[in-house]
Image (cartoon, grey):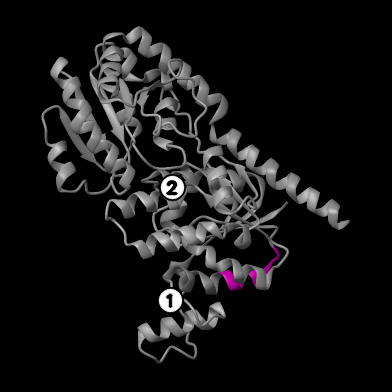
Amino acid sequence: MKKVLIVVPFNDIYPPMNGGMLRSINLLHQLSKYVELTAVIHQDRDSFLKAVKEYPAIQNSTIISTKDKKPGLDLFSFLPSKIAKALRFRYWNRSLKGSAESNFLLIYPLLIDQLKKQAFDYVILEDINILNITKLIRRFQPAAFVIYDAYNVNTRLADTAFKSGKILEKSYELIKKAEGTLSTLTDAVFTCSMQDLEELNKMNNGKLTGIIIPNGVTIPENIQDNESFKNLNANYILFCGSLDYLPNQEGLSWFCKEVFPLIFQKNPSVRLMVVGKGEPGNELRKLLDQEGIIFYGMVERVNDYYKKASIAVVPLLSGSGTRLKLLEAMGNEVVVVSTSTGAEGIEYVAGENIIIADDSKIFANSVLELLDNRVFAKSLATAAFTFVKEHYDWNIIGKKMNDYLQVRLKNTEANEGI
């Protein structure tokens, strides 16, 4: 069985509260079915392993948490903390350049320990902020194949954030530089869509190797219990997405300001349910206070809201990757109205399994038509459910990922005469 080391530098992988964490936990689960997996995480091990009930294959893997490792004494321990971290980073990183990075300092001792103990066929990195550990991997295991999982094109997101004043130009340039050197830092990338792969490859002057590992969906059990088709007069629509994510904030603001008033004016019984963690901010908060909108914030079970919703809206105007919430809605057999940006990277058929609308009036009229014509809405939702079940089920994606790892390694062994 092939050995894979994956580094997931997040504190809140399980329960997943945003698209990135949903992708991470599902990739961990799928890899656990096929390879001998070791995962280095920030989340404490006990709370993470509660995921086994929902993602049973994870119990087959070795989970190592940075929270379980107490820092030992070294040459720098008796110096002031800030100075000690800076010197330790330079010493461990074998470079006089760069400032101390917390992920690197937390992960380094665990990574060294694992790289010394066993040889890995693959090392998968789950965040752009830990690309600097590739030098460490090369030093101890030059034969390991390093993969970066690009669940977004961060340069595109950073560009939007910079233009809106959310981040400084220096931060934007650092992100752009990191993604522009992926071809030299890694052996391959996973991307969510062809658009993302082409964009990253262009940033790397055509030298980037990669494969599309799309976002997926877990098909809920007892999908026939969906209340939206028991009650054909249901007037609940749903927006689901983390409000910590700038494209979600921007898209929801546009929908609440430009689209929902047009819907509510013609159908005052409509209710917009907004579900997602994070603070909406003053401007969006005011928009969410208008009549007809119910802001739930973070909820324990998103599926409960899909059961109630007749329509899910994905009104995004920017962003990258593919929208897990869109696939999630389809997997819950809820009809989706989305902007073309919101549905980017998904091989949909407009008018057959989804409605695409980029104009506020067209978007509003599309929602109203679906609320009035439940037979049409149900046909779209049924087609969408079949579509994601056949193409975006996590089990199908997991097999594709394993096939890539096995074939690539087999080809390498053949080339090396093993």
Find disc 2 in the rendering and name its residue: 20
236 left or right of 143? left
Work out whether residue 268 can be spotted.
Answer: no
- Magenta span: 111-119
Under circle 1, the secondary element is loop
The quadrant holding residue 416 is: bottom right
Q: Position of residue 82 (x, y in %)?
A: 36, 83
Which mark is in front, 1 or 2?
1
Residue to which mark 1 is pinned: 100
Q: Nearer the viewer, residue 370 or 98?
A: 98
Measured from the top left, where is residue 158 in percent x and y?
A: 38, 53
For residue 402, which quarter of the picture? top right
How many neighbours does mark 2 have within 10 angstroms: few (below 14), some (14-19), or many (20 or more)?
Answer: some
Q: Which mark is residue 5?
A: none
Of the pair 173 and 298, the residue shown nearer to us? 173
Look at label 2 and name its amino acid. Gly
Query: Is 249 above or below relative to 341?
Result: below
At horizontal 36% and vertical 84% (from top left) the residue drawn is 81
